[in-house]
Image (cartoon, coloured by chain):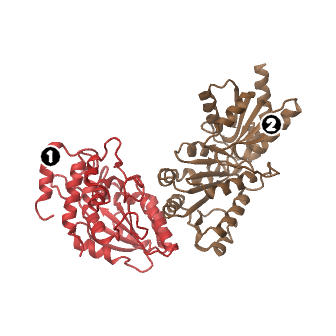
Chain colours: A red, B brown
Amino acid sequence: MAANTIDIAAAIRKDVVCMHCKGTNVGSAMSCADILAVLYFDVLRLDRPDDPQRDRFVLSKGHAVSAVYSALSLKGFFPRGLLGSYLVDGSPLTGHPSRGSVPGIEVSCGSLGHGIAIAVGMARAAKLDGRAHRVFVLCGDGELQEGSVWEAAMMAARMGLDNLTVIVDANNLQGYGRSEDIQPIETFAPKFAAFRWGVREIDGHDHAQLRDALHAVPFTPGAPSAVIARTVKGKGVAEMEDELGWHYFSVPLAKLAPFVDELGNGDR
Amino acid sequence: MRNALLRKLVEHMERDPSLHLLTSDTGFHVFDDFPQRFGDRYINVGISEAGMISLAAGMAIEGKRVFCYGIVPFVTMRCFEQIRVDLAYPRLPVTVVGVGAGLTYGPAGVTHHAIEDIAIMAALPNMTVIAPGDPVEAESAVEALMTHPGPCYLRLGKTGEPVVHARGLANFEIGRAIRVREGEGVGIVSTGNLLPMAVSACDRLAERGRSPALLSMPTVKPFDAPALLGLANRCDVIATVEEHNLFGGLGSIAAGALADAGACVRLVRCGVPDEYAPDAASQECLQQRYGLTGEGIASRILATLGRKA
């Protein structure tokens, strides 16, 4: 049986809140904490970051990397104490992932619309070599406005990459407001399906749904899979939830303790 | 030059199963036999240059050596940021091959011209930039790239370029200039497809009693500053020759290297002025217009020598 991913998600959120006394994008990192908890502690076949057989994870929405650093440290891939150096001068923990900076960061990302296409290359290489590992990508819903996403979607389907899964952290908030207002391309599921992907839509904070979906891939034999995970930006701290401002704010020191307390209570 | 690339690619793909070639729906009939010979190691990804570069990056992360082939503007400028973030930043062994150096595609128009590519590729940390001057340099470069540890931009002409190094190149090395002619007083430094014009300029100057030295610099980056400075020590005038915008190309890089070293030499930069060609014009026509011919280059050097005297 896997670890208690709900507790893990709470731990990730607490780490994230503490790390974001510096820097932006705390809401984006909170939004994907449940997805990352289930991925890293239930789904990915990943015991050692240097195991050639490990499943690969690519964070395409690179601005949420603090949550990934937290998950990697909880996996024991690097000391927990390193998290305190996030964004500090000279730290390996940059605000967007840099390949090889710490064990477990597979790909440099931070410009949106790159990660899925890179993952297509990784998944294709695995297929060509007859290797069994899988590649998972986490991207944002606003990110789907990048044309390069759909170049990658075409290629993955054409190459039959059923070892590739894209999870869309669909929190419906992006830099300037609601994604559905800025560029209403909603109905992601039919779009991926039209590109010949297998698709499932779930509540991205419901661990049972996350587990069921991510263990069920590939949804369609011979096709890549997309999981549209409906999420709430800033999930876990009431003041942050679904509030655009937390795309930009750092956590004020005065609010750190109450936010951490809030994350430690309740049933999240 | 393209045939030189093909020969080397085929030779290495035959024996190296980690070597892959991606194209973005270009090279009509050039790769016809690749699917049969190399199966999945050749793929036309479709008209998706950005996707092609990221795909190559993902494959390189998993241990593949990948060449991405396309027409220069599309395989460099369309997907510049993919090259920057996905290849240059993580130093992955992917070679971006651009055909149509400079004004090769002449009358096709500015969309197909490539006069900015060296500047933008050279501005990327970790990126090697190679613009071979003839098919022999192209073949040597591709051979060297088979063991090159990082990303490279390889800028080729197209087909039918004359051979300059008729006796071959024994010691080609990425990052090293090639001494084509020994001489003194005047030094010509050429990169890319204008090498035959630089040779012709040397002939014109020799006819007029000069004995120019000629360096071919297929590698623009890392830049072989010692070779340039060695030449500058023996010369009153150095001319740089490139089919590229004068902003940011070989001439700019050479000027910087000479200034850094405090070299006392007159520099004549021959290249494309900072403009887009306004009309349909062949490569030959544009070369004439911009003085990128043997006579044009020689004349500018002589004029500079004259002014100096």
Chain of the residue where label 2 is placed in the rendered structure: B
- From this viewpoint, is residue A198 visible? yes
- Answer few, some or many: residues within 10 Å of disc 1's Cα (few below 14, many 20 plus, some between 14 and 19): few
Q: Position of residue B161 (x, y in %)?
A: 77, 52
Amino acid type of the residue that numbered disc 2 sits on in the rendered structure? Glu
Q: Which residue is mark 1?
A: A255
Q: Position of residue A43 (x, y in %)?
A: 31, 71
B135 or B292: nearer the viewer: B135
- In the drawing, what numbered circle is on residue B182? 2
Task: Check disc 1 and report its element: helix, strand or loop.
Answer: helix
A3 or B202: nearer the viewer: A3
Q: Residue furthest top?
A: B309
The C terminus of chain A appears in which quarter of the rendering? bottom left
The N terminus of chain A appears in which quarter of the rendering? bottom left
Query: Residue at point 22% right, 63% down?
Result: A8
Q: Residue furthest bottom?
A: A221
- Res. A167 image quadrant: bottom left
